Amino acid sequence: GDDADAASHPFSTLSVFSYTNDVQAVAFARADAHAATQGALHCLFAPPSSRASEMFSYTASADGVFVLVDAAAAHLLGGARGDAWRCLYIHEGSTDKKGDETEGTIAALSARLAAEEVSVLDVTTLARNFMLVRADAAERALRTLQESLSRGRALLAARPQLSRPPPLRLALLPPRLAIGALALAELPACAHALLRLVFLPRAPHAFLHYFEMGGEVSLIVEEAPLDALCADGGGGDDACAGGEALRAALAPSLSRGWRAISVAAAQGAEAVGILSALTSRIRAPIMNVSSLDTNFILVRDADVAAVRAQLLPDYEIAQ
């Protein structure tokens, strides 16, 4: 029956919860990215008892820097304040798999939100999935996802039928990326390395992402600068110790060989159905990081050719 089908469905162990605090999105052009540094450092390295924001997301790319923090801490970053967002946490209840191991999760959930005309920013880590929706749409989005997850097969069956794919510009970013996780308690020992990787890179970031919530720290960084930490003998003993501490902390989870596909829409975050349109076509492991202007869909380097073919004829990925 329907109950048995729902209970046995791959999505049956997923549930969704709403983060209680409003989240503020703050964007800086690349030339002004330094303006976010002082506040970002406070969010990263303040003691646990005095951390200004329970959620902190920092994304750097050719577009600039995009930060998500609790609305109450947004003043630390300066910059223009926009609409408030609410974070929906997609929880995997099974101990046998992680959230990213449920194939089609992003496609299915984003499709349900697209059907309700809800704009979404999505952030995935190796273990978890966070979807951010505007605060005034949060109750509707939460109800939609909870109802969908309670009836597993309906989640896949109810994808919206798009009359035509939304116009998007896709480009494959050059560097190979590494993705890893570390504990909040490991941050102090890794401080010098994170300063060099995140805030003092030798070359502008093609793509970098730091995410922290609930004691989990997720880092997506280009492989080359990660491997080069203190390999050149620069930065002094503290920098070398920090580099070794960071590599040791990341080692148990580190996943190498990823590439980022930047996805830009004319309407930016106002666009509905971007994730659904793309991820429903991709048959490969993916992760995603959103900013207000761009989605960065991460695929394994070995899957790039297959993903390129899967997106044709609707979308072509520029080099």
Image: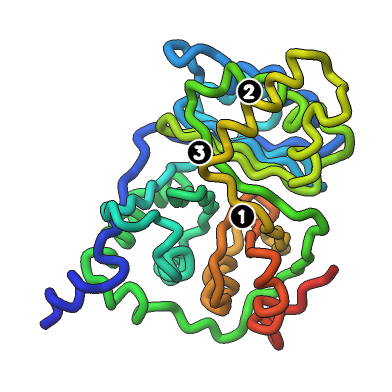
Q: Work out which quarter of the rendered image holds the C terminus and state it.
A: bottom right
Q: Secondary structure at mark 3?
A: strand
Q: Nearer the viewer, residue 279 or 95?
A: 95
Q: Mark 3, mark 2: which one is toward the viewer?
A: 2
Percent across and percent down for residue 236 are 82, 14
Could you say which disc has been placed on residue 228 in the image? none
What residue appears at the point 52 percent right and 41 percent down from the top-left corner? 252
Residue 214 appears left or right of 67: left
Q: Residue at point 56% right, 22% down?
A: 187
Separation (CA) of disc 1 from disc 2:
33 Å
Q: Residues within 10 Å of mark 1 (few under 14, many from 20)?
A: some
Residue 117: give x, y in percent of width and height.
47, 65
Give amino acid for label 1.
Ala
The answer to whether 292 appears left or right of 9 in the picture is: right
Q: Secondary structure at mark 1?
A: helix
Determine whether the residue tagged by mark 2 lies in a helix, strand or loop. helix
Question: Residue 84 got which mark?
Answer: 3
Q: Residues within 10 Å of mark 3 (few under 14, many from 20)?
A: some
For the point 30% across and 57% down, which residue is it?
96
Instruction: Look at discs 1 and 2 and give the one toward the viewer.
Output: 2
Residue that badge 1 annotates = 269
Q: Earlier in the sequence, mark 3 or mark 2?
A: 3
* Distance from Cα at disc 3 to Cα at disc 1: 13 Å
Residue 77 seen in the figure: yes
Counting from the top left corner in percent of width and height, residue 111 is at 45, 70
Residue visible at 53% across and 53% down in the picture: 122
Which of the numbered marks, if any, corresponds to residue 190?
2
Task: Name the quadrant of the N terminus.
Answer: bottom left
In this rendered view, identify the residue nearer to me: 117 or 293: 293
